[in-house]
Amino acid sequence: MTSLSPLNPMLIDDVINRTLAEDLGRAGDITTLATIPASARARAVIAARENGVIAGSDLAIAAFRCLDQTIRFDTHLADGTPLLKGDI
């Protein structure tokens, strides 16, 4: 397996900012704003639905951090790691 260089953080930030701006618009996610209190907190686990390879962890973490600087991630597998259906 070959090792890839990390993506340039400036490119990551640009893509995330443009994507979130398109998705949220000026008003934000109005359904979420109307139905979920700002003080709400959640916990999630990402599990593989099929066999595959971990990819895009840095992008996902950066996108979530744009929305909440206090978010915490416990990553157990690095990008490029093969996984089986059901792996967390």
Image: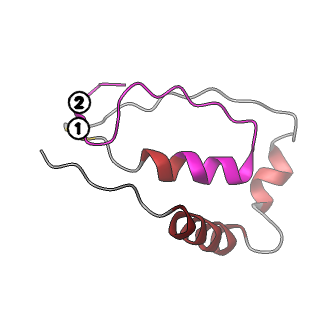
In the drawing, does residue 17 fall left or right of residue 60?
Answer: right
Q: Was residue 80 drawn as part of the magenta stretch in this picture?
A: yes
Question: Which amino acid type is shown beneath numbered disc 1?
Answer: Glu
Q: Which one is nearer the viewer's eye here, 83 or 62? A: 62
Mark closest to the chain's N terminus, 2 or 1: 1
What's the magenta bit mostly, secondary-structure-wise? Answer: loop
Image quadrant assignment for residue 23: bottom right
Pointers 2 and 1 in contact (C-beta within 8 Å): yes
Q: Measuring 64% from the left and 75% from the top, which residue is drawn there?
A: 22
64 above or below 5?
above
2 above or below 18?
above
Residue 65 at x, y = what percent?
67, 47
Q: Which one is nearer the viewer's eye here, 53 or 24? A: 53
Residue at image mark 2: 85
Q: Measuring 51% from the left and 70% from the top, which residue is drawn there?
A: 11
Q: Which one is nearer the viewer's eye here, 56 or 29? A: 56
39 above or below 76?
below
Q: Measuring 29% from the left and 36% from the top, which residue is drawn there?
A: 49
Q: How is the image coloured?
A: secondary structure
Dot 1: element: loop
Q: Check disc 1: other Cα within 10 Å, few if <14, some if 14-19, many if 20+.
A: few
Residue at image mark 1: 50
Residue range (magenta): 61-88
In the drawing, does residue 50 fall left or right of residue 60?
Answer: left
Residue occupying the far left of the picture:
1
Residue 63 at x, y = what percent?
60, 54
Q: Which mark is residue 14?
A: none
Instruction: Give the quadrant of the N terminus.
Output: top left
